[in-house]
Protein backbone atom coordinates (compact mmCIF):
# COMPACT_ATOMS: atom_id res chain seq x y z
CA UNK A 1 0.00 0.00 0.00
CA UNK A 2 1.38 3.38 -0.96
CA UNK A 3 0.34 6.89 -1.89
CA UNK A 4 1.03 8.40 -5.28
CA UNK A 5 -0.02 11.19 -7.59
CA UNK A 6 -1.67 10.18 -10.90
CA UNK A 7 -3.34 11.95 -13.81
CA UNK A 8 -6.95 12.04 -14.82
CA UNK A 9 -8.01 11.82 -18.44
CA UNK A 10 -7.95 15.63 -18.63
CA UNK A 11 -4.33 15.55 -17.38
CA UNK A 12 -5.11 17.09 -13.97
CA UNK A 13 -3.16 15.45 -11.14
CA UNK A 14 -4.73 13.99 -8.01
CA UNK A 15 -3.58 11.92 -5.04
CA UNK A 16 -4.51 8.29 -4.60
CA UNK A 17 -3.84 5.48 -2.18
CA UNK A 18 -2.90 2.37 -4.14
CA UNK A 19 -2.80 -1.23 -3.00
CA UNK A 20 -1.55 -4.00 -5.29
CA UNK A 21 -1.82 -7.78 -5.04
CA UNK A 22 -0.30 -10.42 -7.29
CA UNK A 23 -2.27 -13.27 -8.81
CA UNK A 24 -2.29 -15.56 -11.82
CA UNK A 25 -4.52 -14.86 -14.80
CA UNK A 26 -4.74 -17.05 -17.82
CA UNK A 27 -1.65 -18.84 -16.65
CA UNK A 28 0.41 -15.71 -16.29
CA UNK A 29 1.34 -13.70 -13.15
CA UNK A 30 -0.39 -10.32 -13.01
CA UNK A 31 -0.87 -7.48 -10.53
CA UNK A 32 -4.26 -6.11 -9.57
CA UNK A 33 -4.14 -2.55 -8.24
CA UNK A 34 -6.95 -0.80 -6.35
CA UNK A 35 -6.84 2.98 -6.08
CA UNK A 36 -8.73 5.31 -3.77
CA UNK A 37 -8.91 9.06 -4.28
CA UNK A 38 -7.43 10.78 -1.20
CA UNK A 39 -7.28 14.33 -2.59
CA UNK A 40 -9.64 15.69 0.06
CA UNK A 41 -7.66 14.09 2.88
CA UNK A 42 -4.43 15.52 1.46
CA UNK A 43 -5.95 18.99 1.31
CA UNK A 44 -7.13 18.67 4.92
CA UNK A 45 -3.70 17.50 6.03
CA UNK A 46 -2.03 20.41 4.23
CA UNK A 47 -4.44 22.88 5.81
CA UNK A 48 -3.79 21.35 9.23
CA UNK A 49 -0.01 21.61 8.74
CA UNK A 50 -0.34 25.24 7.70
CA UNK A 51 -2.51 25.94 10.73
CA UNK A 52 -0.03 24.21 13.04
CA UNK A 53 2.86 26.15 11.51
CA UNK A 54 0.99 29.43 11.99
CA UNK A 55 0.18 28.53 15.58
CA UNK A 56 3.79 27.55 16.24
CA UNK A 57 5.07 30.81 14.77
CA UNK A 58 2.65 32.78 16.96
CA UNK A 59 3.53 30.63 19.98
CA UNK A 60 7.27 31.10 19.52
CA UNK A 61 7.24 34.82 18.64
CA UNK A 62 4.76 36.04 21.25
CA UNK A 63 6.10 38.61 23.71
CA UNK A 64 3.71 37.23 26.35
CA UNK A 65 4.42 33.99 28.18
CA UNK A 66 2.31 31.15 26.75
CA UNK A 67 1.94 27.75 28.41
CA UNK A 68 0.15 24.70 27.06
CA UNK A 69 -1.12 22.76 30.06
CA UNK A 70 -3.67 20.22 31.24
CA UNK A 71 -6.59 21.02 33.57
CA UNK A 72 -4.91 19.11 36.42
CA UNK A 73 -1.72 21.20 36.25
CA UNK A 74 0.73 19.42 33.94
CA UNK A 75 2.78 21.68 31.66
CA UNK A 76 3.14 20.30 28.12
CA UNK A 77 4.89 23.20 26.37
CA UNK A 78 6.24 26.68 27.10
CA UNK A 79 7.38 29.35 24.67
CA UNK A 80 10.57 31.41 24.90
CA UNK A 81 8.80 34.33 26.60
CA UNK A 82 7.61 31.97 29.35
CA UNK A 83 11.15 30.65 29.86
CA UNK A 84 12.41 34.23 30.25
CA UNK A 85 9.56 35.31 32.51
CA UNK A 86 9.88 32.37 34.89
CA UNK A 87 13.69 32.10 34.53
CA UNK A 88 13.33 28.38 33.77
CA UNK A 89 13.84 26.07 30.84
CA UNK A 90 10.86 24.40 29.22
CA UNK A 91 12.08 21.07 30.60
CA UNK A 92 12.15 22.47 34.16
CA UNK A 93 8.60 23.76 33.85
CA UNK A 94 7.40 20.45 32.40
CA UNK A 95 8.98 18.61 35.31
CA UNK A 96 7.66 20.98 37.99
CA UNK A 97 4.14 21.44 36.64
CA UNK A 98 1.80 24.10 37.99
CA UNK A 99 3.75 24.50 41.21
CA UNK A 100 6.85 25.55 39.26
CA UNK A 101 5.21 28.72 37.94
CA UNK A 102 2.08 29.44 40.02
CA UNK A 103 2.15 30.62 43.63
CA UNK A 104 0.13 27.79 45.18
CA UNK A 105 -0.29 29.80 48.39
CA UNK A 106 -2.27 32.52 46.57
CA UNK A 107 -5.80 32.41 48.06
CA UNK A 108 -7.23 33.51 44.68
CA UNK A 109 -6.00 30.35 42.93
CA UNK A 110 -8.82 28.03 44.04
CA UNK A 111 -11.44 30.54 42.90
CA UNK A 112 -9.68 30.99 39.55
CA UNK A 113 -9.52 27.23 38.89
CA UNK A 114 -13.16 26.79 39.86
CA UNK A 115 -14.24 29.61 37.54
CA UNK A 116 -12.23 28.15 34.65
CA UNK A 117 -13.74 24.69 35.24
CA UNK A 118 -17.23 26.18 35.37
CA UNK A 119 -17.05 28.67 32.49
CA UNK A 120 -14.24 27.25 30.40
CA UNK A 121 -12.05 30.31 30.85
CA UNK A 122 -10.62 32.70 33.43
CA UNK A 123 -8.98 36.13 33.27
CA UNK A 124 -7.53 38.03 36.21
CA UNK A 125 -4.52 38.53 38.43
CA UNK A 126 -2.73 35.73 40.27
CA UNK A 127 0.54 35.23 42.08
CA UNK A 128 3.34 33.53 40.16
CA UNK A 129 6.83 32.39 41.07
CA UNK A 130 10.17 32.45 39.29
CA UNK A 131 13.00 29.98 39.66
CA UNK A 132 14.53 30.51 43.07
CA UNK A 133 11.22 31.39 44.72
CA UNK A 134 10.82 35.05 43.68
CA UNK A 135 7.11 35.87 43.67
CA UNK A 136 5.44 38.38 41.37
CA UNK A 137 1.98 39.48 40.26
CA UNK A 138 0.80 38.34 36.85
CA UNK A 139 -2.19 38.97 34.64
CA UNK A 140 -3.36 35.64 33.25
CA UNK A 141 -5.87 34.51 30.64
CA UNK A 142 -6.60 30.79 30.62
CA UNK A 143 -9.04 28.67 28.62
CA UNK A 144 -9.95 25.00 28.31
CA UNK A 145 -10.09 23.41 24.84
CA UNK A 146 -10.06 19.96 23.23
CA UNK A 147 -7.09 19.03 21.03
CA UNK A 148 -7.13 16.99 17.80
CA UNK A 149 -6.94 13.75 19.82
CA UNK A 150 -9.97 14.67 21.91
CA UNK A 151 -7.90 15.39 25.04
CA UNK A 152 -8.76 18.30 27.36
CA UNK A 153 -6.04 20.94 27.30
CA UNK A 154 -5.65 24.40 28.76
CA UNK A 155 -3.81 27.46 27.52
CA UNK A 156 -2.29 30.12 29.76
CA UNK A 157 -1.12 33.55 28.65
CA UNK A 158 0.75 35.36 31.43
CA UNK A 159 2.01 38.95 31.63
CA UNK A 160 4.11 40.37 34.48
CA UNK A 161 2.21 43.28 36.06
CA UNK A 162 4.43 43.72 39.13
CA UNK A 163 5.23 47.37 38.31
CA UNK A 164 1.57 48.17 37.75
CA UNK A 165 0.61 46.39 40.97
CA UNK A 166 3.27 48.24 42.97
CA UNK A 167 2.16 51.57 41.47
CA UNK A 168 -1.47 50.79 42.31
CA UNK A 169 -0.56 49.79 45.88
CA UNK A 170 1.52 52.96 46.28
CA UNK A 171 -1.39 55.09 45.04
CA UNK A 172 -3.82 53.37 47.39
CA UNK A 173 -1.37 53.88 50.25
CA UNK A 174 -1.06 57.57 49.43
CA UNK A 175 -4.84 57.92 49.32
CA UNK A 176 -5.14 56.23 52.72
CA UNK A 177 -2.53 58.58 54.17
CA UNK A 178 -4.35 61.59 52.70
CA UNK A 179 -7.65 60.38 54.13
CA UNK A 180 -6.05 59.90 57.56
CA UNK A 181 -4.51 63.40 57.37
CA UNK A 182 -7.85 64.98 56.46
CA UNK A 183 -9.52 63.22 59.38
CA UNK A 184 -6.80 64.49 61.73
CA UNK A 185 -7.16 68.07 60.41
CA UNK A 186 -10.93 67.88 60.79
CA UNK A 187 -10.56 66.62 64.35
CA UNK A 188 -8.16 69.41 65.30
CA UNK A 189 -10.26 72.14 63.69
CA UNK A 190 -13.32 70.85 65.51
CA UNK A 191 -11.43 70.90 68.83
CA UNK A 192 -10.16 74.45 68.17
CA UNK A 193 -13.64 75.67 67.33
CA UNK A 194 -14.97 74.18 70.54
CA UNK A 195 -12.19 75.95 72.47
CA UNK A 196 -12.99 79.29 70.81
CA UNK A 197 -16.67 78.81 71.55
CA UNK A 198 -15.89 78.16 75.23
CA UNK A 199 -13.68 81.27 75.47
CA UNK A 200 -16.42 83.42 73.92
CA UNK A 201 -18.91 82.16 76.52
CA UNK A 202 -16.47 83.08 79.28
CA UNK A 203 -15.97 86.56 77.84
CA UNK A 204 -19.73 87.04 77.53
CA UNK A 205 -20.13 86.33 81.24
CA UNK A 206 -17.38 88.80 82.21
CA UNK A 207 -18.90 91.85 80.48
CA UNK A 208 -21.80 93.76 81.97
CA UNK A 209 -22.57 96.00 79.00
CA UNK A 210 -25.50 94.65 76.96
CA UNK A 211 -23.96 95.85 73.68
CA UNK A 212 -20.75 93.85 74.26
CA UNK A 213 -22.66 90.74 75.30
CA UNK A 214 -24.80 90.96 72.16
CA UNK A 215 -21.72 91.14 69.94
CA UNK A 216 -20.05 88.21 71.71
CA UNK A 217 -23.21 86.09 71.47
CA UNK A 218 -23.41 86.84 67.76
CA UNK A 219 -19.90 85.45 67.33
Image: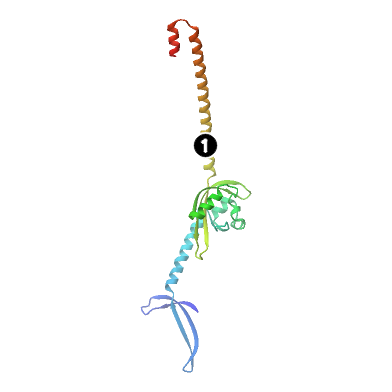
Vertical side of 50 occupied by 61: above or below: above
Residue found at the very far top of the displayed protein: 209
Q: Which residue is mark 1?
A: 172
Picture coordinates of residue 162, whole percent (x, y): 54, 44
For the point 45% across and 11% down, the residue is 216
In-front residue for pair 4/68: 68
As helix, strand or loop, the secondary structure at mark 1 comes to: helix
Residue found at the very far bottom of the displayed protein: 27
Vertical side of 209 occupied by 52: above or below: below
In-front residue for pair 178/45: 178
For the point 52% across and 61% down, the residue is 152
Residue found at the very far right of the displayed protein: 132
For the point 51% across and 11% down, the residue is 202
Picture coordinates of residue 188, whole percent (x, y): 52, 22
In-front residue for pair 195/19: 195
Residue found at the very far left of the displayed protein: 10
Vertical side of 101 occupied by 47: above or below: below
Amino acid sequence: QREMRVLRLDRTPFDVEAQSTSTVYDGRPVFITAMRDISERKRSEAALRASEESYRALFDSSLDAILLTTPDGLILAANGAACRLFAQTEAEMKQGGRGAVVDLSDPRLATALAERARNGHFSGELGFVRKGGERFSGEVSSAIFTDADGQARTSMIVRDVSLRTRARDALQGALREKEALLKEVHHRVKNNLQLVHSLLRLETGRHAQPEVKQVLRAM
